[in-house]
Image: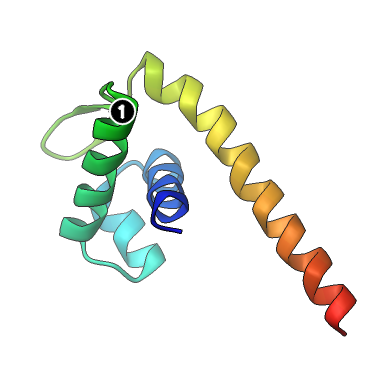
Amino acid sequence: MAYLDNIAVFVRVVELGNLSAAGRDMRISPAVASNRIKELEKHLGVRLFNRTTRQLMPTEHGTVFYSGAKQVLEAVTEAEAAVSALSG
C-alpha cells in the first residue's frame, strides 16, 4: 500500500499546493510528505513538481500523472465501499 499512499500524498499536494497543507490534511509531517513525493518521482523517473520556497507546481508530467492518479484513488475508494457494503 506504500505506493498508493505515495499517490495519495501526490494528489493532495497538487490540490493544496504545498507539502505543509497536504501533510496537515493527511496527518503526516511535511518531511514525510516530501519523502513520499521523492519516492514517487524516483519510481516514475521524472520530476512531478517545480519547487519554489512556498509552493509546488506540477510539471507537465505531474499534470498528466495527476489525472490518472486521481482516478485510481477514486476507484480504490469505490471498491472499498462496495466490499464494505457486502460485508454489512
Q: How is the image coloured?
A: rainbow
Residue 13 higher or lower than 67, as above or below:
below
Residue 46 higher or lower than 68, as above or below:
above
Quarter-of-image position of residue 18: top left
Image quadrant for the C terminus?
Answer: bottom right
User: Which of 80/28 is in front?
Assistant: 80
Question: Tag 1: Cα neighbours inside 10 Å, few (<14), some, or many (≥20)?
Answer: some
Residue 66 placement, left or right of 87:
left
Residue 64 placement, left or right of 28:
right
* Residue at horizontal 39 percent and vertical 25 percent from the top: 62
Residue 54 placement, left or right of 67:
left
> Residue farthest to the top?
60
* Residue at horizontal 60 percent and vertical 48 percent from the top: 73
Quarter-of-image position of residue 49: top left
> Residue farthest to the bottom?
88
- The type of residue carrying mark 1 is Met
Where residue 55 appears, x then y in whole percent? 23, 37
User: Which of 16/2 is in front?
Assistant: 2
* Residue at horizontal 41 percent and vertical 49 percent from the top: 3
User: Which of 27/17 is in front?
Assistant: 27
Residue 63 higher or lower than 43, as above or below:
above
Q: Say which element carries label 1.
A: strand
Where residue 24 appears, x then y in whole percent? 32, 66
* Residue at horizontal 84 percent and vertical 81 percent from the top: 87
Where residue 32 appears, x then y in whole percent? 21, 59
Where residue 36 appears, x then y in whole percent? 27, 49
Report which residue position mark 1 lands on.
57
